Image (cartoon, grey):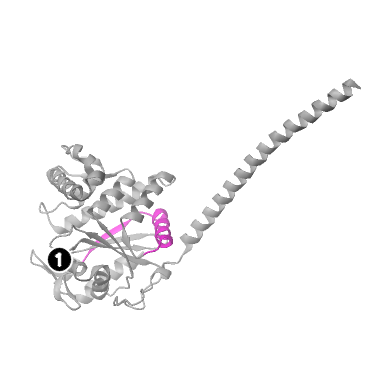
Amino acid sequence: MYYDTYRGKRGEKGRRQRGGSGCTGWLIRSLLKLLALLLVAAVLVAAVLYALPPSFMNVEPANADLSLTDGLPGDRVNILLLGIDFLEDGQQRSDSMMIASVGYNSIHLTSIMRDTMVDIPGYGRHKLNSAYSYGGAEMAMRVVNDTFKLNITNYVAVDFSTMVDLVDAIGGVDVEVEERELEHLNKYAYDTFRKINTVNPEKYGHYINSQPYTQGGTLHLNGLFATGYTRIRLIDTDYIRTSRQRRVLSAILEQVKAQIWNPLMYARLYGVCRNSIQTNLSLAELISLGEKALVAGKIETDRMPRDEYILDNGSSIEITDVQGNIAAMHGFLYGD
């Protein structure tokens, strides 16, 4: 009897122990199932956003007059990228303007020469980079649409400090820098630091310890020097300057692709997008465009207007063949 009683107590104790162990196992299995469900949900959401047709983004915002051209292909979405300079005399101009044409299999990136003379509604004839100072992103989109007969309804605008933050968020970019560019790279990097540090010394003060580059080649540039590189001018033409800007944007995309499975990078990028980037795109649309960009092949780049359709007097550019210029733009943006 004693044996049976003792065995019963041990059995009960054993069952209690097994029950506790089973509870822990159940909790672990439940957590693993939850993580699996979340992963599946994330994949499904990503797939849905990737499949979002570009034509869904080509919708003119309410109460806007963007001079849209009808009948253009709907398998791509054209985004106006605006690089905004620092506020000066109460105005900001678009220091650089590009069109990113995004489809399912390719990205076409074209710079628009900022000194191109255009008609700005209500203000007369001015250089293209003045459109932003007169009416912000909406006026810039309207003028670009009217000049090149496009249907741009979305924009992304960044200033110099945001450009610094974007490049730093992805850990810098690799750029081929020529020896003749080194002095100017360092000069514009310092000038960028001086301006952004004046606005936010707590955030950018650490750049005071940045050392200038003394040798050319393939350099890994942080946000400050990458921004300085895009600002290099005077040593050559504005045509070359725009090619530097496209080179840095291409390097940014390649760096993101190289870290495609790095969740920390996406968290940092989200922080920059949430706090600094100006855009009328929703978060879902930005993610959809980002997914298409990541799976696309090499970025094709160009600049407009083309030489054969302009007269450049050194300070401004006049389009001499309007239809030829429009045809060249459409051929590049919508070509394979």
- Residue 78, magenta (yes or no): no
Name of the residue lying farthest toward the right: 1
Q: Is residue 106 visible?
A: yes
Query: Residue 316 appears in which quarter of the rendering?
Result: bottom left
Q: Quadrant of the N terminus?
A: top right
Q: Which residue is mark 1?
A: 115
Q: Furthest residue to the top?
A: 2
17 is higher (above) or lower (below) than 97: above
Relative to residue 119, is residue 4 drawn left or right? Answer: right
Residue 262 visible at all: no
The number of numbered discs placed on residues in the rendered structure image is: 1
Residue range of the region highlighted in magenta in the rendering: 281-304
Residue 179 rendering spot, x and y as whole percentages: 14, 42
Image height check: is 328 above or below 267? below
Residue 65 vs 114, above or below: the answer is below
Looking at the image, which is closer to me, 261 or 305? 261
- Tag 1, which secondary structure? loop
Q: Residue 161, position in %: x, y? A: 24, 51
- Residue 309 at x, y percent in the picture: 17, 70
Q: Is residue 237 above or below residue 145?
A: above
In this orientation, which residue lies closer to the viewer: 20 or 185? 20
Q: Position of residue 180 (x, y in %)?
A: 12, 44
> Hey, what amino acid is under mark 1?
Asp
User: Picture quarter containing residue 220?
Assistant: top left
Quadrant of image for the C terminus: bottom left
Q: Residues within 10 Å of mark 1 (few under 14, many from 20)?
A: some
Give the quarter of the image for residue 132. bottom left
